[in-house]
Image (cartoon, rainbow, N blue to C red):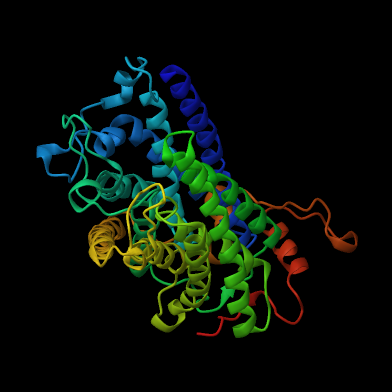
Amino acid sequence: MEEAIAAADTAWLLAAFAAVSLMVPGLAMFYGGMVSAKNTLNMAMMTFGAFAVVGILWVLFGYSAVLGDSIGGLGILGDPLEALGLGSLLEAPADPGLPPALVAGFQLLFAGITVALISGAVADRMKFGAWMVFAGIWATLVYFPVAHWVFAFDSEDGSVVGGWIANTLAAVDFAGGTAVHVNAGVAALALVLVLGKRRVFPAAPRPHSLPLTMLGAGILFFGWFGFNGGSALAAGNSAAVVVLNTVAAACAGICAWLLVEKLREGHATSLGASSGLIAALVGITPACGAVSPIGALIIGAAAGALCCLAVSIKFRLGYDDSLDVVGIHLVGGVLGTLLIGFLADPAAPNGVAGLFYGGGLDLLWRQAVAVAAVVGYCFVVTWLIAKLLDKTMGLRVHEDSETEGLDVSVHGESAYVMEHAPLGGPPTTGSEAVDAAEAMTASAVDGPTMAAPKA
């Protein structure tokens, strides 16, 4: 029986692994559709590039730093030499259970996607080489320690000491509200403060392909079931509750964002539906194992509505978060993590009670401390990394490259090549092709840029 259960759990996690892996191209499409046609390949390259760099570091020492025995038993960082190169994970476990190699691969996806999320904030203006270096340093100095705090649990026999948030503080974060979304959102804010604004800010370049963005959001939605459900690490009731809560929150988030958007702007848009979906998924990520389906609806609706309002804060405060990583991932992640303190249902898989279920303020203050610790550590270290890179190799592309578009100037490619110009004109390639593509999609009324939404 134990072997059959272990086989079922392994099969479930393999399926979740495959689903989460699709979030890499999903994120590339989601971000790529929201930028200009001149920068869509650059956005995809930033996603894939960051994922690749982090994946290498994860195999070398990242897995050990996150899930290894905490150095000195302090709960700050796992021993990076414990499973150096992951060669020790090749053998099957002596007792029936999840293969350690599968757990390592599953958590690799989390690490790579977290770093890739940050790229949306720096769209249209960051050097690709500087981004790749930043991705590696940030993963090492920020993600690996914070993920150890949140994801590394003490072993049952006490032989392995995990992270302080998961164990000493005992805050609840089922699938990465703090380690993934708050972490990425804070890093995005710190990085754009050093990088500076786009040349056209506060006007926003027109999203060149909203269907591409909606397709990317849909793929991310699919992958999120593996992201959250796979974090149960077993094919059982916990995973079932988690995926139910995930889809419930997603539905509420879409409707809430569209309602707020309609009331504020007079239109319910496809970009709003996509953004509301992602905001709700961010909000439910830490809470998916702690709340009831009604709680999931509340969190999803709250995330959709609040994030819709939050994305315009950048225009008031003057920081250029290109694709609203701060407004969605930071705000949604903080909201979802804190609402656990109110809405946690002891009947849910996590088995903890929030304020509204008779748990008092005990859980809420733990959630607040976890958020504050991640925000403070991530912002300071990210700002220092960005400053160092800016002073040495430089973060910002030349103004001419920003004007031309990064696809051609950085990568020497164009996402869209028109073999023949409209009306039988001369053939166009390279930057001329994307100019023509943008001209065909831009309306005569709105022009090539979009005005800032109402603050």
Whether residue 209 can be seen here: no
Q: Position of residue 299 (x, y in %)?
A: 47, 65
Location of the N terminus by quadrant is top left
Residue at the limit of the structure toward the left, as seen here: 72
Q: Residue at x 48, y 19 (%)?
A: 4
Query: Is 286 located above or below residue 275 in the figure?
Result: above
Whether residue 252 can be seen here: yes
Asked if residue 40 lies left or right of residue 325, the reply is right
Query: Is 129 located above or below residue 283 in the figure?
Result: above
Q: Residue at x 64, y 80 (%)?
A: 262
Task: Between residue 454 and residue 100, name the one nearer to us.
Answer: 100
Q: Position of residue 59 (x, y in %)?
A: 35, 30
Q: How many labels, in total?
A: 0
Q: Position of residue 269 (x, y in %)?
A: 67, 71
Q: Residue at x 47, y 26 (%)?
A: 10
Task: Between residue 112 and residue 394, name the one nearer to us.
Answer: 112
Residue at the limit of the structure toward the right, as seen here: 424
Task: Between residue 367 and residue 220, name the one nearer to us.
Answer: 367
Report which quarter residue 136 is drawn in.
Answer: top left
Q: Position of residue 375 (x, y in %)?
A: 28, 63
Asked if residue 267 lies left or right of residue 3, the reply is right
Query: Is 147 located above or below residue 323 in the figure?
Result: above
